[in-house]
Image (cartoon, rainbow, N blue to C red):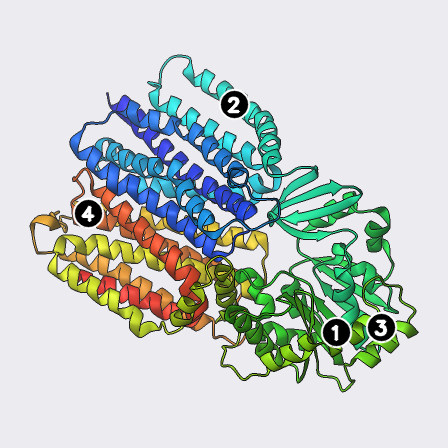
Amino acid sequence: MKDRLRFQMLGVGIALAVLGFVSTVSQVMLMRELVATFYGNELLYGLALMAWLVWGAVGAWGIGSRLVRRTDLSLSVFAVGIGAIAPLFIAQMTVLRGIRTILGTTPGAYVDFGNTVLTVLLIPALFCPLAGLLFTLGARLVLKCHGTAGHAYFFESCGAVVGGLLVSFVFIPTLNAFQVILCLGGLALISALYLIWDGQGHAKFLLPLLAVALGIAALAGGTVLDRWTLGWQWRDVVSYTESPYGRLTVQARDGQRIFYTNGLLSFETQSTFPEEVAHFPLLAHPHPHRVLLIGGGMAGNLREILKHPVHQVVYVELDPQLIMMAQAHLPPSEAAVLEDARVRLVLSDGRHYVANVAEHSFDVIILDLPPPTTGSLNRFYTREFFAQVRRALRPDGLFALGLPSAENYWSPELTRRNLSIYETLHRIFPTLLALTSGDHLFFLATSGSFPIDAAAMAARLTARAIQTRHVTPFYIEYIFSNDRFHADRQRLASGRAVRLNEDLVPICYYYDLALWLSRFYPAVGELFERAGLVNLVWLSCPWALMVLLARYQRRWAVPMAIASVGLAHMMLQVVILIAFQTEHGTVYSGVGMLVTAFMAGLALGSALGNRLTRCWEDRGAIQISRLSSSREMASRPLRVGLMGIQVGVIGLSGLVFGLLWLPYEIPAVAFGMLAAAAGCITGAAFPLAMLALGEHTAGAAGWLYGADLIGGALGAGIGATLLLPLLGIPQVCAFTALVGIAGLLCLL
């Protein structure tokens, strides 16, 4: 009997680890698919993560905690639930792949914001409630077999650690989305069969054989499903690939090649746009001998730059897959630009390269990246980056960048975004000129004394004998003399109050988010204008109400404290990720390391919390009391432990705040340690809270797990997507400390 109980305990533990594994991997795959489908920014990430956590809370708290109280569910029911993961995964991914076809959206176009939000909020409902329910059922079975439900969180966290490692370093670089999903489904099915198996017979030989067969079927079937479902979105596709940075797709139409990145047009052959990107800055500079190009090289920028008498062009590109696809599908004459002896290709993050290049290295630096629609892209439009660019330029060097704009009417949202970047750039470069060409705004910035005017640029174009189709001497004269040139100068010199874009206060990401939303709902601009009034004083009001409610209803104190830990954990996770990204660039393996460190911290904290509560119980220091029936808290050690978790949140927030102001570069390992500490605090809170609620209450695990998920959902949906760009990282750290103080007061 003991052997059978031990076997069941092992099976449930493995199943919970599998649940954590597949939840982590599927969450990453869902995020990537959402980005490829809707061209997501952090608002989309936040909504998706919020929906994921809320639906998980529905399963754990809304369904699971009630279900386990009323029925005596068996191990076989839990096994059936684990086995049901596979078809739900496939359904979730298939619906998402076909949603653009269902909505009738053409390739490369934006999906209506309302449909985007509805899809993002509903897609996780296919799997997340089941995942939350299974955690609650698994916690009950662990309680039955082991005597403490706190180990359920530990098992799930261990699976999440392995999932975070494999999805970052194995699955994404080697497998497509459906291969990953089918492999996860096969793993869940094997886990379910292991639960049903009684530990005897020939099943121990059959399960490994079945696992191998399912793996082969997943690899073969995933390839077929991936191509089939991708064909719903695209026609005339000649190639597509998944890189660590997104999905790249190439269309072929009548000799033209069109490249898409994450569903949006990246560039196309036969376009004249690269002429403006390259020739405006190179004609403005009298002697552009050494040029740095960040992004856009394969779009035609390199081809146009090499028409000038340059000695060297350093081309920095983040994604090596883009280079490979361009060389394979561009016309031979355009693909051959990388073979020019004057071109040096650097596969790296552009900001990281600029920060580490020698002083006064370049005559011209051209930035050709998308606008600051995400926190990652916003790093290339901050005051700190512009200062790095000026250091890398020679004393008379020139810096150029472009932004999507409007040919005539600038909406208030567009004006704020453009003006913020203009003012931020002007703080670093004394001479700054804006040129509007069609729906694009180009900035030419320099510390040199040479004039930037139409006559000088047109004369250089003629003197250098450069052959162009679009940028001609007459066109240059037109750009400098039309009404839009003078109107835009007046708009930018209007003196309207805007905030500067900085690394620690990425306000342009917020401005661009408002601009994105205003395309679908123009009235949202006024709402975002008022949102600028948000400050820590206003944000303290809801937490004061939470404390008062917890003091009035003592049975809510622990769930509220756990919800505050979940919110603080999510906020700190985003702050650490963005701070690392700003400090070290978007090094993919580094970001994967941070995610894994978070998960490892969760597992370690859960193990420490379980050991601590077991030690206290053995010493008789804790007597479990049900808070719902008493106004008194649990015994003193448990009370001190729960309060210590909140003190840890406050202390870690202060530590992150202090490190960000250090005058020297913070090593990557320090960010990993911060990430692990944040996870450890969250993981340790769950076992302590379980004991505070009454460990032997059947629905306690689901109730607390749901509270943790709700807190995380608030952190993702409101804090990480709005408060971070609006308030900046220092104030968000202060806000997180405020959350910890509120949780502490709830427990007093």
Of the residues tagged 4 and 3, which is closer to the observer?
3
Q: Amino acid at mark 3?
A: Pro
- Return the disc, 4 or 3, that comes first in the chain's sequence: 3
Nearer-the-camera pick, 487 or 305: 487
Disc 3 to disc 2: CB gap under 8 Å: no
Q: Secondary structure at mark 1?
A: helix
In the image, is 527 to the left or to the right of 628? Answer: right
Q: Does residue 44 appear in the picture of this structure?
A: yes
**Percent coordinates x, y for residue 746 in the rendering:** 19, 61
Q: Amino acid at mark 4?
A: Leu
Disc 4 to disc 1, how far (Cα)? 71 Å
Q: Amino acid at mark 1?
A: Ile
x 88%, y 77%: residue: 459
Seen at 37% across and 65% down, the residue is: 652
Q: Secondary structure at mark 2?
A: helix
The percent coordinates of residue 130 (x first, y second) are 34, 35
Checking the image for residue 691, the label placed there is 4
Residue identified by numbered label 3:
473
Taking the view exactly as shown, the residue that stands out farthest to the left is: 630
Foreground mark, 4 or 1, reads 1
Q: Earlier in the sequence, mark 3 or mark 2?
A: 2
Contact check, label 4 and label 1, Cβ < 8 Å? no
Tag shown at residue 214: 2
Q: Is residue 207 left or right of residue 458?
A: left
Tell me: 116 left or right of 55: right
In the picture, the disc for residue 479 is 1
Residues at badges 4 and 3 in contact (C-beta under 8 Å)? no
What whole-number distance in Å separates the C-alpha atoms at marks 4 and 2?
41 Å
